[in-house]
Amino acid sequence: MDQKRTLILAYVVGVALGDGNLSRPNKRATRLRVTCDQRYPTIAKEITRSLAFLFPNNKVSQVPGPKETYFNISVYSNKLDAYLPWKVGCGTKIEQGATVPLWIFKQPSYMRACLRGLLQTDGSIYTDRGYCMINFCNNILPLAKAVEQMIKKLGYMPHLYEAKQQSGNPKYTVRLSRNVAAFLEDIKFTKC
């Protein structure tokens, strides 16, 4: 696989781990469905272009959600089973402990692309007492640890926190509070 294709795959892995869902509704090909907020058309275009690049012979479609606040981007391909770190029919991402594949840790450019996808889907940027902060939140400890590790490998100092939700399930937050602007530029982050 060439460098450009691998970078795009690392980004798609991040997006899919964040807001992706795998299913096999037609009992033949695997479908990746990524939920997108209507407020972020630039991210939706990047996801759509990336999927179209990875799967040039497959249709990438946008399907409206039941509420007008979001829509789904989906593609069918049996290659998804090899590309993504969890499988259809084996439980949820949480049950499978889905996390970042080891090959992404081999190059900083892959980690940056994956982090961009993860933060565009399950991240938030906010200001607290005049300081810019980033949070990445999810319910999968191996994934939270992988995000923390990738950010550290890129030279930044994140912190991992665990909190109990009302349901009693844990929620993991990776927070970056220093050098946030440099980090966002480093991973070429956009949220528009």
Image: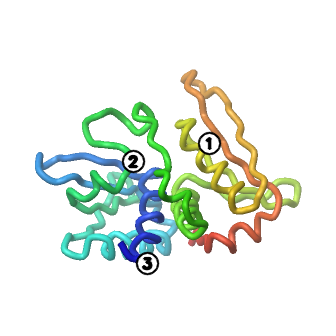
Front residue of 182 and 171? 182
Whichever of callouts 1 and 2 sits on the residue coming sooner in the sequence is 2
C-alpha separation, residue under disc 1 versus residue under disc 2: 15 Å
Quadrant of image for the C terminus: bottom right
Residue 145 badge: 1
Neighbourhood count class around disc 3 (C-alpha, 10 Å): few under 14, some 14–19, many 20 upward: few
Give the residue type that dot 1 points to.
Answer: Lys
Residue 57 badge: none
Front residue of 162 and 13? 13
Q: Where is residue 96 in the image (x, y as percent from the top left)?
A: 40, 34
Residue drawn where x is 36% and y is 44% of the image: 86
- Depicted 19 relative to depicted 74: above or below: above
Give the residue type that dot 2 points to.
Answer: Pro
Disc 3 designates what residue? 4
Residue drawn where x is 37% and y is 60% of the image: 71
Front residue of 78 and 58? 78
Q: Where is residue 105 in the image (x, y as percent from the top left)?
A: 56, 57
